[in-house]
Image: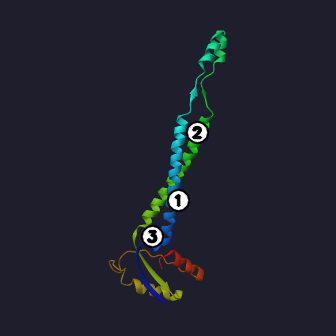
C-alpha cells in the first residue's frame, strides 16, 4: 500500500486532457466563427443591395395612351428581384450559425475559467482498496501542504479504478 502527495495544481493542470479538449474546441469554434461572420456581413450587404425596379418610362408612355381605366389596371407596383428572398434566407442561416458559435465560445470561456482555478491538491493512492482510507487519513492528518492545518475546510472526490482499463484511464485523465 502506498500513498503520496502529488502536488498542488489548477483544475486544468490536474486534468490536462480537459485543457487540451477546451483548447481544441476553442480553436475550432473560433476558426469557424470568423468566416461565418464574414459571410454574414457579405450576405447583409447583398440583401441591402437588392434593387427595386419601378416600371420603365416606355411602359408608362404606352399605357398613358390607353384609357384611364386601362392605365390603372395595367400598372403594377414595383418589382423586387427573386434574390431578396434568397439573401434573407442566407442572412438568417448565417445569423444562426454565428449565434451558435458564439454560444459555444461562451461555454468554452466558462470552462477555461474553471480550469484556471488553483487550489486543487492531488493525492495518489495505490494498493488494496481496504487500506486506502488509512493511507489517505495519514496523508491528510496534518492538513494540506501550504494550508491552514487539519481543520481547514476542503472537499475530496475519490475515484477508484477497479481494473487495469479504469486505472490506465484515470492515469491518462489526471496528472498522475
Dots 1, 2 in contact, CB < 8 A: no
Look at the numbered disc 2 and give the secondary structure of its residue: helix
Residue 107's place in the image compared with 126, above or below, is above
Left or right of residue 30, residue 72 in this image: right
Label whose residue precedes the other's in the sequence (2 or 3):
3
Whole-percent x and y of residue 114?
44, 65
Residue 45's place in the image compared with 118, above or below, is above
In the picture of the structure, the residue carrying the numbered disc 3 is 12
Label whose residue precedes the other's in the sequence (1 or 3):
3
Depth check, front residue: 90 or 57 = 57
Rendered residue at 47%/63% (across/down): 111
Rendered residue at 52%/38% (across/down): 45
User: Dot 1: within a 10 Å radius of its alpha carbon, few (fewer than 14), some, or many (20 or more) residues?
Assistant: few
Left or right of residue 144, residue 29 in this image: right
Q: Distance between the residues labelled 1 and 3?
A: 19 Å
In the picture of the structure, the residue carrying the numbered disc 1 is 28
In the picture of the structure, the residue carrying the numbered disc 2 is 87
Amino acid at each position: 500500500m502506498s500513498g503520496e502527495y502529488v502536488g498542488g495544481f489548477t483544475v486544468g493542470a490536474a486534468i490536462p486532457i480537459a485543457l487540451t479538449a477546451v483548447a481544441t474546441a476553442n480553436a475550432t469554434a473560433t476558426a469557424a466563427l470568423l468566416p461565418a461572420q464574414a459571410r454574414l456581413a457579405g450576405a447583409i450587404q447583398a440583401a441591402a443591395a437588392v434593387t427595386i425596379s419601378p416600371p420603365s418610362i416606355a411602359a408608362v408612355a404606352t399605357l398613358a395612351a390607353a384609357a384611364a381605366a386601362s392605365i390603372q389596371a395595367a400598372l403594377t407596383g414595383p418589382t423586387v428581384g427573386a434574390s431578396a428572398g434568397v439573401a434573407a434566407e442566407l442572412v438568417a442561416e448565417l445569423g444562426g450559425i454565428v449565434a451558435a458559435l458564439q454560444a459555444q465560445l461562451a461555454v468554452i470561456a466558462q470552462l477555461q475559467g474553471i480550469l484556471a482555478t488553483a487550489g486543487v491538491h492531488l493525492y495518489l493512492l495505490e494498493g488494496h482498496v481496504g487500506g486506502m482510507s488509512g493511507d489517505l487519513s495519514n496523508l491528510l492528518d496534518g492538513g494540506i501542504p501550504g494550508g491552514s492545518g487539519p481543520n481547514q475546510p476542503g472537499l475530496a472526490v475519490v475515484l477508484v479504478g477497479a481494473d487495469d482499463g479504469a486505472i490506465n484511464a484515470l492515469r491518462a485523465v489526471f496528472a498522475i
